[in-house]
Amino acid sequence: MPWLKRLIAVLCLIVLAALALSLHYYLPRHEVVRVTGVEVKRMDADGVINAENPADGPTRDVYFINTVSNDAAREVAVYRNEDTRWGFPWYFKFDSADLQAMAQDYSRDANQLVVIRYYGWRVQMFSMFPNITNVQATSSPSAPFPLFNTLFFTIVLLIVLSITLAVRNRLRRRHRPLAPSSPQR
């Protein structure tokens, strides 16, 4: 039976790792960057449509925002700017064209710092880009405090602690020895 306990522990670790990766992907993050350009590409389910990848189904226009980091490394990053609409993740984003216009305006000033809020990962092998949900001009070179993520994890921690305490108290009551009863006459 020790193998069963190990198997359950490994499965729990796998579930926790999957949950942590999902939260890292879907929760918003902030970055202070300079916008260097914008573009629109025609895409289908397979990715960007070009000579090597012709359209083979329904297509859509996807906005892209090119940026460079504000630090000494000056790392470049490309973000997609696509509406989430009513679907998952529930950012209810309907203004990608407006964000694209704002980003294009910010790209005209090479010294303008911008705070972008986004979710997702950049995976070059699969042509995956993080999706921008907000663009705002800033004068501060540091990213804002992640208030939403802090509140989210605080609430999750409180829920987990309350469930743990409730289960622990219930198990203690179940295993508590009964008090000796007085002899009846």
Image (spheres, rainbow, N blue to C red):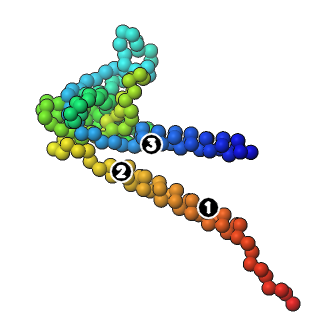
Answer with mark 1 or mark 3, whichever residue precedes in sequence.
3
Q: CA distance from mark 3 to mark 2?
A: 13 Å
Instruction: State whether residue 170 appears in this view.
Output: yes
Q: Could you tell me residue 2's position as x and y percent? A: 71, 45
| Whether residue 62 is situated above or below residue 132 in the rendered picture | above
Q: Is residue 137 left or right of residue 91?
A: left
Q: Could you tell me residue 90's position as x and y percent? A: 41, 42
Residue found at x 53% / y 44%: 16
Confirm or deny contact between disc 1 and disc 3 (CB under 8 A): no
Residue found at x 74% / y 75%: 178
Q: Is residue 151 left or right of residue 174?
A: left
Residue found at x 33% / y 24%: 61
Instruction: State whether residue 82 appears in this view.
Output: no
Amino acid type, mark 1: Val
Quadrant that contains the C terminus: bottom right
Secondary element type, mark 2: helix
Answer with mark 3 or mark 2, whichever residue precedes in sequence.
3
Answer with mark 1 or mark 2, whichever residue precedes in sequence.
2
Density class for disc 3 (Cα within 10 Å; few <14, some 14-19, many ≥20) is some
Residue placed under numbered mark 3 in the picture? 23
Tell me the tag on residue 148.
2
Q: Could you tell me residue 118's position as x and y percent? A: 33, 38
* Furthest-top residue in this view: 51
Q: Could you tell me residue 31's position as x and y percent? A: 28, 39
| Residue 183, picture quadrant | bottom right
Residue found at x 35% / y 13%: 50
Near-viewer residue (137 or 100): 137
Amino acid type, mark 2: Phe
Residue placed under numbered mark 1 in the picture? 167
Secondary element type, mark 1: helix
